[in-house]
Structure formats: structure tokens, C-alpha cells
Image (tube, grey):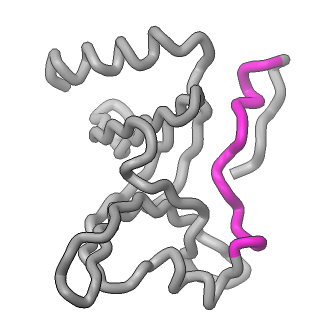
Amino acid sequence: MTIALSFVLFLVTSIHPFAPVLDSLPIAEDNIYYDEYGKRVFEQIIFYRYYSDMSAYHVADYRMSDKGTILIFFSRSLNQYVYLIYVEGLLREIRVNSRFISWTQYDPEVWDRNFLPMSDRKKLRKSNNNVVGGGVGNPL
């Protein structure tokens, strides 16, 4: 980890008075969506979770890349990719085992709704129940 990255991590974590909301997921996709003319429309990060009852990976949650501050790095000590996302006063740390980048002319998150409706998704945690009162937290 470079000195600059360490300094940024120190600043982000020191200005936030609470521990980050921690999630762990198997796969993240950094998706860049283009229209039919090849113009970049938006960038998003899509997090996937394995649904054993369906024997498939489906979208758990997503974040638009232009909302808030996002820092992505590979942690050798964890052997995982780490996404630090700071949006509206909430610091999230999302750890993923695998990460890939895609360039598409369709929205993979919207396409996945054909197989798993948004209401059935197991989304990212809303708060960090492990910090306040020693609770067990939401199951992954």
C-alpha cells in the first residue's frame, strides 16, 4: 500500500467517528454503461451474492460511482478487494473476493431483475449492528 493511499485511508477513517458498516460479498462488478452511440452514460458498482436456492449469483446491491467518495484497493493481508464508500455521512467497507470491470450497452443490474426482483434481494447492511451494543449484526 502506498504512502498516499495510507494517508487517504487515515483521513477517511479518522474523520468518521464510528466504525464503518462492514459487508463481505463474493463478487463486485465495476460497470460502465454506454448508449447506442458509444457515449458513456454512467458508471456503477454492482455487488453480487450467491443465492443457494437458485444456485446462481445475483445482484445484491449497487452504487452509482458518481455518488459520494469511493476508494478501491486490494488488501494483501485480507487477500480481498476492499471498497470504501462514503455517502451521506455513512462510511461503508465492502470486501469482495473477486472483482471485474465491464463495458456494456445494457444495464446488468436492471437485466438481473428478470431473474431476481429487487424486493427479494439481500441488500447491503443499513447500519453497523456489531458496534453498538455488541449485537451480532445482520446475516450475510
Q: What is the quadrant of residue 83 in the picture?
A: top left
Q: Nearer the viewer, residue 7 or 38?
A: 38
**What residue do we see at 37% from left, 49% from top?**
66
**What residue do we see at 52% from left, 65% from top?**
48
> Is 118 on the left or on the right of 56, as rendered?
right
Above or below: residue 58 compared with residue 37: above
**What residue do we see at 31% from left, 35% from top?**
75
Q: Which residues are magenta?
A: 118-132
Residue 129: x and y, percent? 77, 30
> Is 93 on the left or on the right of 123, as rendered?
left
Residue 59: x and y, percent? 56, 70
Above or below: residue 115 compared with residue 131: below
**What residue do we see at 41% from left, 58% from top?**
45
Residue 88: x and y, percent? 57, 33
Above or below: residue 96 compared with residue 107: above
| Residue 72 is inside the magenta segment | no
| Residue 125 is inside the magenta segment | yes
Q: Nearer the viewer, residue 92 or 64?
A: 64
